[in-house]
Image (cartoon, rainbow, N blue to C red):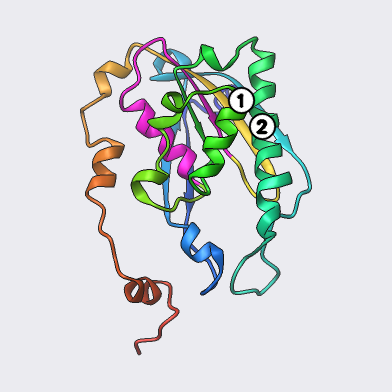
Amino acid sequence: MVGSGMGRYAMAIGMDTAQGKPGDALEYTAASGGACYILGPAAESLAEIEAAYSFVSDTPDFWRRAHAIYPEHGQRFTGEPAYFEHVGSSASTVMSEMGLQASDFDYAVFHQPNKKFPQRIAKELGFSPEQIETGLLSPRIGNTYAGAALVGLSAILDVAKPGQRILMTSYGSGAGSDSFILKVRKPITERQNKAPGTEAYIARRLEIDYATYLRYRSEIKVK
């Protein structure tokens, strides 16, 4: 929208909430959270999007039928051919088209449905554990969610330096993956530490017990 000139600024929000059926794997592997970004002219940006690429297919690894209370998923098929095929294809293609490889990046962040998936795909693409550590939220906040790649990117932008390059790759069941190559710009140093960072928000989170979670999800009726 911004690139076409249809608008000077645009707001993009990635948000998700836990909707797992009681007893289902999604109940303990999905959480709630999200992030919001404002996109605008490159000359005003803190990080410029140098390239983007999308890879999609009709892979029904996750779905919710009409009027169904809870979503369903393909269990073991959520890794192969869903997550790894799409994230790997999207990330490798955008790097190839830009003539870049893993060593050309300072940071990388991938969709985080759990801790192992982003670690495995990062290794397959040639990234080191140090390159993904900053944006890998699952070891610090437990289970993650669909918007975790965007939250991981915000953690990276809290500490990134001008000139550094970032690869971010999301994934959405159904299935599709979007990869973005970002180059950090000098103005970012003027904005960092002006407000609480991602780590600060994580540190001050309020943990709740299972009974409270059930009430919040309306699984237990109190009236």
Can you say whether 197 is above or below 66 in the image? above
User: Which residue position is annotated with label 2?
Assistant: 88
Report the side of 69 relative to 208 (left or right): right
Residue on which the image places disc 1: 125
Q: Is residue 68 above or below residue 178?
A: below
On-image quarter of the C terminus: bottom left
Image x and y of residue 103, in percent: 53, 13
Q: Residue at x 42, y 45 (%)?
A: 138
Q: Nearer the viewer, residue 120 or 154?
A: 120
Q: Quadrant of residue 107?
A: top left
Q: Amino acid at mark 1?
A: Leu
Residue 58 appears anywhere in the view: yes
Locate residue 195, reporting x and y percent. 22, 33
Q: Of circles 1 and 2, which is in front?
A: 1
> Residue 134 appears in which quarter of the rendering?
top left
Image x and y of residue 57, in percent: 77, 42
Residue 10 position in % (x across, y down): 49, 33
Q: Are marks 1 and 2 in contact (CB under 8 Å)?
A: yes
Identify which residue, 159 or 37, lies in the foreground.
Answer: 159
Q: Residue at x 32, y 14 (%)?
A: 187
User: Magenta segment, which residues?
Assistant: 147-170
* Residue at the spot 26% in from the left edge and 23% down from the top edge: 191
Could you give the CA–CA distance between mark 1 and mark 2, rounded to whole angstroms?
7 Å
> Does the magenta segment cover residue 168?
yes
For marks 1 and 2, the one nearer the N-term is 2
On the question of residue 12 being in view, the answer is no
Circle on res. 6: none
- Is 87 magenta? The answer is no
- In the displayed structure, 6 sits above or below 202; it is above
Depth check: give the residue in front, 203 or 127. 127
Q: Quadrant of the N terminus?
A: top right
